[in-house]
Each structure stands twice: as structure tokens, then as C-alpha cells.
Image (spheres, rainbow, N blue to C red):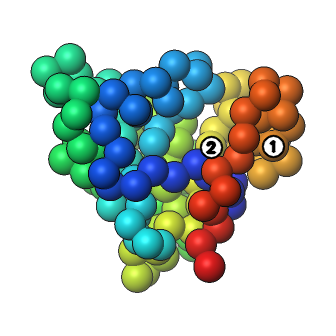
């Protein structure tokens, strides 16, 4: 599980997330208020009928986009296969975002914090300074 995913405030706009999704490695945007996951936005959710100033809190969804931290690897893979997703937000019983489970494009493993930092550095990106929550 990636423990330092980029997170977005509920007031983030659809236009801002469209820019975020310009990176082909990005599959999901995590919308968080304090330490609670409000929902997940995927590229396809940003249909053209949403104006650029639509707040993502109106678009984000949880169903099929989260997993419990106690789930086994086979359970996680089955959920990803069934929902056709390579990203699942890991959420505690209290709704707190714990991290992001990211299946590698090859399908032979999951991304780590080190993988994310290495890619961000290689492409001049920055890890979101708001994470982890204190």
C-alpha cells in the first residue's frame, strides 16, 4: 500500500482534477476532508457535462473504490478484477484514509512509497506535503 498518496480537498474543482489526470500514471484522485475519505474520482467520472468549477465533492464516490486494511492480497486482486480498477483506497473502520493500493501495470505486484517517490523525482513532480495527516 502506498502510504503517501496525493490527496485533494473537497473544494477542488473538476478543472483542477482534469489537469491532475493529464499524468497517464494517475488513475484515481482521493478526496479527503481532514483525515476522512470523502470519495474517489476516476478519469471517466469527469464527464464533459461537469463544468470546470464543479467541486469534486459532487463527483467523488466510495462504492467499489475502497478496501479494508485487513483484506488479503487475493481479496484485493479479486475486488480489482471485479471492478476493473487498478487503484483502491484503503480505509479504516472510522472512514480514515490509510493509503492507496496500486496494482502495477504489469499486474505482477503493487506499487510502494519508494516507487512513487522515484517516479515523482524522475518526472520533476512533488509528493503532496499534506500527507500524512497529523
User: Where 100 falls versus 28 (above or below)?
Assistant: below
- What residue sits 45% from the left and 42% below the top? 29
At mark 1, the secondary structure is helix
The residue wearing badge 1 is 117
- What residue sits 47% from the left and 61% below the top? 67
At mark 2, the secondary structure is strand
Residue 46: x and y, percent? 28, 27
Number of residues whose C-alpha sits closer than 10 Å to that of mark 1, classed few (under 14), some (14–19) or many (20 or more): some
Q: As rendered, which of 93 and 11 lies closer to the eye?
A: 11
Residue 71: x and y, percent? 55, 66
Q: Quadrant of the C terminus?
A: bottom right
Q: Quadrant of the N terminus?
A: bottom right
Q: Can residue 69 be seen by looking at this rendering? A: yes
The residue wearing badge 2 is 102
Q: Is residue 112 left or right of residue 107?
A: right
- What residue sits 20% from the left and 17% below the top? 48
Number of residues whose C-alpha sits closer than 10 Å to that of mark 2, classed few (under 14), some (14–19) or many (20 or more): many
Amino acid at each position: 500500500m502506498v502510504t503517501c498518496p496525493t490527496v485533494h480537498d473537497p473544494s477542488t474543482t473538476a478543472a483542477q482534477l482534469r489537469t491532475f489526470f493529464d499524468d497517464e500514471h494517475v488513475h484515481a484522485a482521493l478526496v479527503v476532508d481532514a483525515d476522512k475519505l470523502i470519495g474517489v474520482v476516476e478519469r471517466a467520472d469527469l464527464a464533459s457535462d461537469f463544468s470546470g468549477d464543479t467541486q469534486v465533492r459532487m463527483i467523488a464516490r466510495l462504492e467499489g473504490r475502497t478496501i479494508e486494511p485487513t483484506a488479503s492480497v487475493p481479496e484485493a486482486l479479486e475486488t480489482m478484477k471485479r471492478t476493473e480498477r487498478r487503484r483502491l483506497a484503503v480505509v479504516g473502520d472510522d472512514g480514515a484514509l490509510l493509503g492507496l493500493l496500486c496494482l502495477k501495470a504489469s499486474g505482477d505486484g503493487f506499487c510502494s512509497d519508494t516507487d512513487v517517490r522515484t517516479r515523482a523525482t524522475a518526472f520533476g513532480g512533488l509528493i503532496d506535503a499534506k500527507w500524512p495527516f497529523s
